[in-house]
Amino acid sequence: MRPMRQEIIELTEETTQQGVSRRNFIKGAIAASAAVSSANYLFRANGGALLAQSPAAGAVERLITLNINGRSRRLEVPPMETLGFTLRYKLGLTGTKIGCDRAECGACTVLVDGVPLYSCSLLTHTVRGREVTTIEGLEAEDGTLHPVQQGVLDEGGFQCAFCAPGFHPMADGIALEGLRLIATWLPRAVADGSDLRARAHMLAAASMGAVAFQKGLGAVHALSHPVGAVLGAHHGVVNGVLLPYVLSFNRSVLSEKLPLLARSLDLGETFDDVLDWLLRLRDEIGIPSTLAALGVSESMVAQLAPMAADDPTCAGNPAAVDEAQLASIYVHAIRGELD
């Protein structure tokens, strides 16, 4: 077969006189281009790869095939598009949530060849030829929910938090094990980023936290989200700053939970044993002790508190909390005052 080549055809007075008008030439060129492009995909789909035009060196093909929940899906994907975006906005699989959008919260987690990965930070092109399973893929073909899905529906577990209210023993167990791993391995991972064993355990702990999120969040996240939105502060760091202050606010309703957590971490038997450990861990890994260190001032509380009260995670707090109480927690965290 002769190789196809593009030729530049000059429209001269002579060619026009022979019946080739400029308009007809342009129409013909467009039609020919469309035919060649269509034939390229037709040959490729029918196994005629040798007849198809090969992409230029370094180019990324946009029309790709993905294996999603056991089905092959063919769609056009730009090279820098994330899997989370593709799943939600092109395939309509909205069970994959875009939460923090920075590979922290776990709401976007999917299984890729059976391994949980954050789809918000995974390029769609990297999963070509791999099996992707979303939350929708867990249900049976007849629509019967997976036992875990049905349990969440039956028990109202709509949002890790070990301290979150509601009955969810599976999430409680996962959260306790995640906390145990954090107590052991987080200081080592921070002290030496090349300690792969410590980092592997922290990867497991982070995944456990994401799973336990199914139970609920609370005031830590409700207070943290506005700070991140207004100041651009790192969500995880703000959470770390706020945690002791929110824990103190919830003291009255955690009389049963915290002793169990203390015993699980070999800290002792009381609420204060857990709080003291948390403060030591905060200092050891370099988390600031106040929101003031992140640039939050008391003059900002009037702006931040209503935003925190409107945050949906606020409803998962162990103790009921209103806007005035959220404002008070902000002030305590800015001043560094624990109750």
Image (cartoon, grey):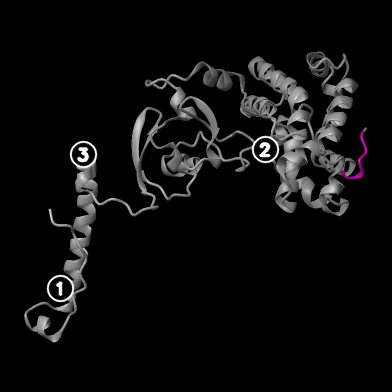
Query: How far from the left and from the top, in percent, is residue 311?
Result: 69, 41
Query: How far from the left and from the top, in percent, is residue 120?
Result: 55, 41
Residue at 18 percent across and 69 percent down: it is 27
* Other-residue count near label 2 (Cα within 10 Å), few / some / many at <14 / 14–19 / ≥20: some
Residue 47 image label? 3
Front tag of 3 and 2: 3
Q: Of the two numbered discs 2 and 1 on the same chain, state the one appearing first in sequence.
A: 1
Q: Which quarter of the picture shows residue 322?
A: top right
Element at label 2: helix
Res. 117 visible in picture: yes
Q: Is residue 45 magenta?
A: no
Above or below, 208 against 57 in this view is above
Q: Which residue is mark 2?
A: 312
Looking at the rendered structure, the kind of residue marked 1 is Asn
Q: Of the two numbered discs 3 and 2 on the same chain, state the one appearing first in sequence.
A: 3
Element at label 1: helix
Q: What secondary structure predominates along the stretch shown in magenta?
A: loop
Q: Of the two numbered discs 3 and 1 on the same chain, state the one appearing first in sequence.
A: 1
